Each structure stands twice: as C-alpha cells, then as structure tokens.
Image (spheres, grey):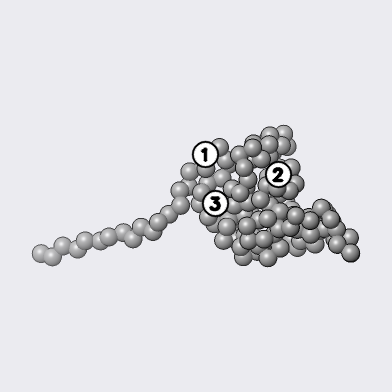
Amino acid sequence: MFGIILYACVEDSVPEQPVPGRWYTAAQVSDGESSYQGHCAVCHGADGSATAEWRTPDANGVYPPPPLDGSAHTWHHPLDLLEQTIVDGGAKFGGVMPGFGTVLDRDERRSIIAWCQSLWSNDIYERWKAIDERE
C-alpha cells in the first residue's frame, strides 16, 4: 500500500493578537500599510509625515494634508471620527481629501488607522486613548 502524505502550506502569517497596549492587531497594521500606500500615501506621504506646513492654507485657502504619524492633530480625534473622516473626506475641516466611503470597507478603514497609529509614540497613543475613551 502506498501512503499519501499531505502537507499543509502554511504561509508566514501576522499575529491576530492585539499589539500590546493598543486596540489593533499586527495583522491590521500589515493590511493597513498596504491600503494606506495605495490610497493615502500620495497626499499624506509614504511614511505618514506629509508636510510640516500643514497648518498653513494655500493661496486658495485650502489646507494641505496633515501628517498622520502623530506629529499633527490626528491624535486629537476619537477612532469613530477618524474613520468618519476617511468615509466623508476632509472638506468639513477645510481640506480637499475625498471621501473613501464607497472605496474602503470598515475593516480597511480601521486597518489604515491602525497602521497610522502604529507610527505614534506610546505617549501620543496614550493621550489619544484618553480622548477616545471620553467619546
């Protein structure tokens, strides 16, 4: 008799456990980086740093994209508002960011936020967490 041995192909996977001290998982960060690069990096920079002049409107009164790396105001907003900004865009904040509500589903939006927050220092994250918990 011949025996058949089946081997399961197990790809390197990113853990689903929460990143210590954070709300998101390493898998969300990994997925979020890919989505961020495809949808957000062109304006907010590949590393989330955008421009240092994000507080200064251009000649048309439009504010440039803010950094999402924890050096701007993004951390001042709770998770639901961050996600809603991705859905609706940035016009209500004086920007021109388009809404991605029909392009990105909830999991993709949350993953993008997770990736951005993974760039934040623990201090900035803890300050954001206190704001998020109040909302």
Residue pointed to by mark 3: 28
Q: Nearer the viewer, residue 71 or 29?
A: 71
In the rendered image, which quarter is residue 103 located in?
A: bottom right
Q: Nearer the viewer, residue 50 or 19?
A: 50
Instruction: Kindly identify the residue that appears in the image at 68 percent across and 55 percent down.
Output: 49
Task: Give residue 20's mark.
Answer: 1
Q: Of the residues shown, which amino acid type is indicated by label 3?
A: Gln
Q: Secondary structure at mark 1?
A: loop
- Measured from the top left, where is residue 63 in percent x and y? 82, 58
Distance between the Cα atoms at labels 2 and 1? 18 Å
Q: Of the residues shown, which amino acid type is indicated by label 1?
A: Pro
Q: Residue furthest right?
A: 60
Would residue 127 appear left or right of 21 to someone viewing this image? right
Closer to the eye: label 1 or 3: 1
Quadrant that contains the N terminus: bottom left
Distance between the Cα atoms at labels 3 and 2? 18 Å
Would residue 80 appear left or right of 38 to someone viewing this image? right
Residue pointed to by mark 2: 75
Would residue 8 appear left or right of 28 to someone viewing this image? left
Mark 3 Cα shell of 10 Å, populated few (<14), some (14-19), many (≥20):
many
Q: Nearer the viewer, residue 130 or 3?
A: 130
For residue 129, say whether it is visible: no
Quadrant that contains the C terminus: top right
